[in-house]
Image (cartoon, helix red, strand yellow):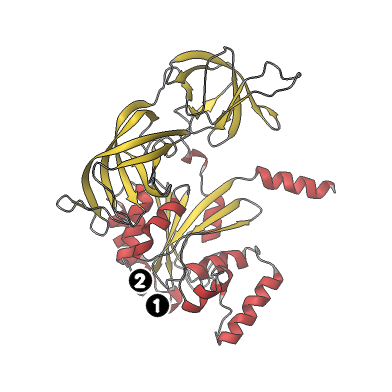
Amino acid sequence: MSTSNNSTEGYLDMELLRFTTAGSVDDGKSTLIGRLLYDSKSIFEDQYQAIEESSRRKGDENVNLALLTDGLRDEREQGITIDVAYRYFATPKRKFIIADTPGHIQYTRNMVTGASTANLAIILIDARKGVVEQTRRHTFIAALLGIPHIVYCINKMDLVDYEEGSFEEIKKELEGFSSKLDVKDVRFIPISALKGDNVVNKSENMPWYQGSTLLYLLETIHIGSDHNHIDCRFPVQNVIRPQSDKWHDYRGYAGRIAGGVFKPGDDVTVLPSGFTSKIKSIDTFDGPLDEAFAPQSVTITLEDEIDISRGDMIVRENNQPNVGQDINMMVCWMNEKKLMPNGKYAIKHTTNDARAMVKEIVYKVDITTLHRVEDDKEVGMNDIARIKIRTTKPLLFDRYDRNRITGSLILIDEATNETVGAGMIV
């Protein structure tokens, strides 16, 4: 019994890497994920037998690993993948969540959904086709969403005879393109998802490539500094007042840390009221902590009795977020109903709810050329635009490139309650 308990504890303590996969139609995304799961021993024998049997029935020469991920049967029959599918797997070094998003242009919003919390984006490119419009689109969205690491997997190298020249040509073009965008870390790996080259195991067919395999990169890439550990931000989600004799005087503020490091004894300010206090303790289900940082969920207690409610934010005295009602942001539009100039929407920002009016549509972005389109301001589904909004009450925010949590918000259609837009504050 004790061994399983220890392994569970180890598993819970392991670092979690969230990554998203994107590419155009048929460039092997499902096969790549299938290969990752299969070669890293993350699938069961009977799952493998089932896809082996299914591949044989369809007359495929190789076992079709794509069947592992294309779970929905009618999709498999049509040969297309839609929406965002999340997969979970683990190796002895790390846990992973894969957000698998479809490649078609009409699913830009799905990619935004899947990529919004990712540490890393894998963008697949077919070695025979090279850089296509979708490659640029996915790179732009990854940069817009502030994904810290982009890994270009140049796939189907087996179909270009594993030639170094093909890889280098694509790499050079991508380096040129991604340098125009704000991406911190870009990597390139030549792979064959079908044959398994450089996915989990090093390729013997490409001795000219000296870099790491994809799985090794996913297991070792440094993600600790992806969170902002400088600006202390704690949006309050809930006030905890246990109704019991033992905890009669307990008053804690629960939430998820959005940035910075908090310690008992720290001087803090509560916004928007501006009252100051000291942190008395940082409590969790497993006991008190000496320090807590993003993205931990904790309960903070303060030395003084202050009136605090959901939507307030606890910050450090000398480092405060922007407070304001006029907000400039990039928005990815997710609804068939177009974005209305002067339209009124409900918004959610951290733990805060408010309403907002669209003051101005500044420009739309042509994702392929990265140019600003200023003469056509009609924003429809999957469009990305720069807009200005005014909110009914002040928000406590940072720029999105400083903090992906306090810098993002969503717009909601009040009539249908649908999320219609995802915004990144600039």
Residue that label 2 marks? 166
Q: Nearer the viewer, residue 118 or 129?
A: 118
Q: Amino acid at mark 1?
A: Val
Residue that label 1 marks? 160
The structure residue drawn at horizontal position 68% and vertical position 76%, both measured from the top left corner, is 49
Do the residues under discs 1 and 2 have CB atoms within 8 angstroms? yes
Q: Quadrant of residue 245?
A: top right
- Residue 403 drawn at (x, y percent): 41, 36
Give above or below for 125 relative to 286: below
Give above or below for 372 relative to 43: above
Q: Quadrant of residue 166?
A: bottom left
Quadrant of the image containing the C terminus: top left
Give above or below for 304 relative to 65: above
Give above or below for 150 relative to 25: above
Q: Could one spot residue 29 in this view of the protein?
A: yes
- Residue 326 drawn at (x, y percent): 28, 31
- Residue 287 drawn at (x, y percent): 70, 28
